[in-house]
Amino acid sequence: MARLPRLSAPGHLHLTIQQVHQREPVFADAADRRAYLDCLAAAAARHEVAIHGYGIAPDEVRLLATPAHAQALGQMVQFIGRRFVAALNRRHGRRGALWDGRFRATVVEPMPYFLPCLRFVEHAADARPDDPGDDDAVPWSSSEHHAGRRSDGFVTEHACYWALGNTPFEREAAYRSAMRATAPDAETQGIALASLHGWVLGSPGFERLLSTQLARRLRPLAAGRPPLKRPAGSE
């Protein structure tokens, strides 16, 4: 079966996942993560992608972003691949590809999915290995930025984040409260599956809206074979 084109809708919120080949930990220290974030900032600005959140695990990167045009996400990832991967290989004396094939992405309906997806993205950093040389300011995810403890200049706040309060203090407090809540397993699994398989994450109404803009299926086909149609008069 032919592979569907990646789900991409300009001006809409996207969640992307990029996994390291064979899930091998490659972000060894803070220098690797800072190098990735510097490259991400340059790539996002160059290719018109608004970054709303990020999370870096040792073997995976998750982003919440809005592309300005249909090719923006792909071009941003290609830019990072050329610049960051080459530098990482030189630094660690490694060779070959870093990422496990193409990146995965889904289009997200902001309400009610923005905060659950932001939590999913930022909690990727919870998988970090112990690193005694790090401190709390190490940029594993955008959580410190959203909580008001650090400013990531390349992060663009989504309208759903602004809606958390009228002042920075109110927004940061509401964000911290939302992130303290434990995500239900079904929620986390649903977000992960939609992202990894490229299915839209949203309501039926949102899906209908996207179907008028995108020339591809937005949901998986029903399991099993379709029922056979009997010829007229065969009964």
Image (cartoon, rainbow, N blue to C red):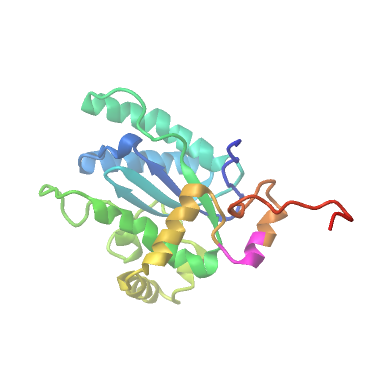
* Magenta-span inclusion, residue 205: yes
Whether residue 81 is visible, yes or no, is: yes
Residue placed farthest to the right in the image?
Answer: 233
- What secondary structure is the magenta-colored segment mainly? helix
Residue placed farthest to the front in the image?
Answer: 235
Residue 3 to residue 154: above or below? above
- The percent position of residue 81, horizontal first and vertical second, equals 41, 32
* Magenta-span inclusion, residue 97: no
Q: Is residue 221 left or right of residue 81?
A: right
Q: Is residue 155 left or right of residue 1?
A: left
Q: Nearer the viewer, residue 220 or 128?
A: 220
Picture quadrant where residue 119 is located: bottom left
Residue 89 to residue 3: above or below? above
Q: Residue at x 85, y 51 (%)?
A: 231
Picture quadrant where residue 97 is located: top left
Q: Nearer the viewer, residue 101 or 73?
A: 101
- The percent position of residue 91, horizontal first and vertical second, equals 23, 27
Query: Split into 4 quadrants, where in the image is the C terminus?
Result: bottom right
Q: Residue at x 21, y 55 (%)?
A: 137
Residue 134 to residue 101: above or below? below
Instruction: Give the total number of marks visible in the rendering.
Output: 0
Q: Which residues are magenta?
A: 202-207
- The percent position of residue 104, horizontal first and vertical second, equals 47, 44
Q: Residue at x 59, y 66 (%)?
A: 203
Residue placed farthest to the left in the image?
Answer: 132
Query: Split into 4 quadrants, where in the image is the N terminus?
Result: top right
- The percent position of residue 217, horizontal first and vertical second, equals 65, 49
Whether residue 15 is visible, yes or no, is: no
Q: Is residue 231 left or right of residue 19?
A: right
Q: Is residue 22 left or right of residue 71?
A: left
